[in-house]
Amino acid sequence: VVPPGVIPSSSDEPPADSLTTLQWLLEVYPTLPPSMRPMEFIQEPGQVVYLPGGWWHAVLNLEPSIAVTQNFVSASNLQRVARHMAHGGAHYYANIPLYYSPDMIDSWAWDSDEEEEEEEEEEEE
């Protein structure tokens, strides 16, 4: 899971839409430094995952699965959704600040040092 405005690949790699999720996981993911790796988890039966609108994400099913998805539009995001529908995804990803408030964008930042410390702790266990 990667927040809007963070492109989950470098310019040296093929466009993300030319790879399957499995290809990206096997070919691109191992080349990323820890600070650039997305959040990763296994969703267990009965669990629900919420992804905020506009977040890059991919799903790799480990076994046959059924998924139910829902896009939610309310007064709080109606203007953003309408703008996205009118201009398309390319405009959205090129103009993130037009779609979200500066406070919301700031809230997406994560501390890569903290993430690396957590990874080191997991490796020690």
Image (cartoon, rainbow, N blue to C red):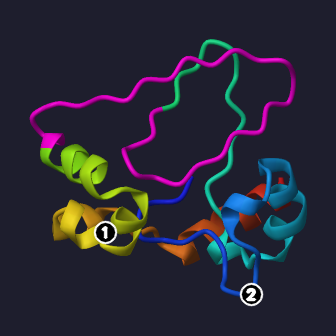
Q: Where is mark 1, residue-wise?
A: 96
Q: Where is mark 2, residue-wise?
A: 12
Percent across and percent down for residue 11 are: 66, 86
Q: Which residues are magenta?
A: 50-78
Q: Is residue 45 magenta?
A: no
Residue visible at 61% across and 12% down in the picture: 46
**Residue furthest out toward the bottom:** 12
Q: Secondary structure at mark 2?
A: loop
Q: Secondary structure at mark 1?
A: helix
Residue visible at 53% across and 54% down in the picture: 56
Decide if residue 20 is on the left or right side of residue 10: right
Amino acid type at circle 2 is Asp
**Residue furthest out toward the left:** 75
User: Tag on residue 36?
Assistant: none
Residue visible at 63% across and 76% down in the picture: 35
Q: Count neighbours of disc 2 (C-alpha within 10 A) and say few if under 14, some if 14 to 19, many if 20 or more.
A: few
Amino acid type at circle 1 is Ile
Depicted 42 relative to depicted 64: above or below? below
